[in-house]
Amino acid sequence: MLVGGLGIIVMMGNITLDVVLKVFWNAPIQGTVEISSYYYMVAIVMLPMALVEYDDEQISVDLLFNHFPDWLKQISLLITFFATAAILSVMTWRTGLDAARAFKVGEVVMGSREIIVWPARCMLPLGFGLAAVAALLRAVLLVQGKPVTKLHDTESAA
């Protein structure tokens, strides 16, 4: 989460400096759009995924779940955690293959200048993999009888 937050701060600084340099000295920072798109935005989204999953902060709809008996809630959560971990694991594997390919070819993008982007491709499997681990940790906590969900205030969401 800290790295994602730092990504926002660095991106804001980079874009602000680019605008100031362009307006006052007609000397923009080359590659700002590409770096923001391929590095900052990917880091901001992918790196905090595990904490979002672990802290139960993802978007969820509890329309029927809240009316289930406790035993059915536990089973539903366990199935959900394993399904989430399985899907995130497949996404980790697939994006890992893409990252390996990008590394192998030394992937770059052409914009105002050539930007190396293969390192950014590694953030996707890292984010998905850590989120899969977080889902499995929540399953373990559920089996141990520890709390795994937050009580969400439905009044404030309306």
Image: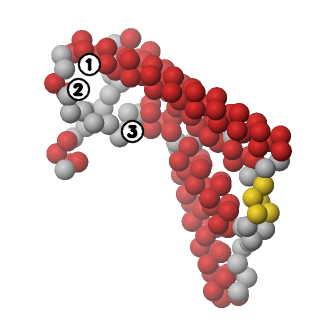
Pointer 2 residue:
65
Badge 3 density bin: few <14, some 14–19, many ≥20, Cα 10 Å: few
Residue 97 location, x and y as percent? 71, 33
Q: Is residue 56 visible?
A: yes
Please identify the quarter of the rendering in which residue 71 is found.
top left
Residue 2 in sight in this render? no
Q: Earlier in the sequence, mark 2 or mark 3?
A: 3
Asked if labels 1 and 2 touch by Cβ distance under 8 angstroms, the answer is yes
Q: CA distance from mark 2 to mark 3?
A: 16 Å
Which secondary structure lies at badge 3?
A: loop
In the figure, is residue 60 to the left or right of 14? left
In the rendered structure, which amino acid carries the disc numbered 1?
A: Lys
Q: Earlier in the sequence, mark 3 or mark 1?
A: 3
Q: Please, what is the three-letter code of the amino acid marked with disc 3?
A: Gln
Instruction: Tell me where residue 38 appears, x and y as whole percent.
Output: 65, 55
- For marks 2 and 1, the one nearer the N-term is 2
Q: Disc 2 versus disc 1: distance between alpha carbons?
A: 7 Å
Quarter of the rendering containing residue 103 = top right
Near mark 1 (Cα within 10 A), the count class, few <14, some 14-19 or many ≥20, is some
Determine which residue is flagged by label 3.
58
Real-space Cα distance between discs 3 and 1? Answer: 18 Å
**Relative to residue 85, is residue 73 drawn left or right?**
left
Colour logic = secondary structure
Residue 53 figure quarter:
top left
The residue beneath circle 1 is 73
> Residue at point 64% right, 36% down?
95
Residue 104 lies, in percent from the top left, at 83, 40
Instruction: Left or right? Give the position of 39 relative to 108.
Output: left
Q: Nearer the viewer, mark 2 or mark 3?
A: 2
Query: Measured from the top left, where is residue 34 in percent x and y?
Result: 68, 62
Secondary structure of the residue carrying numbered label 2: helix
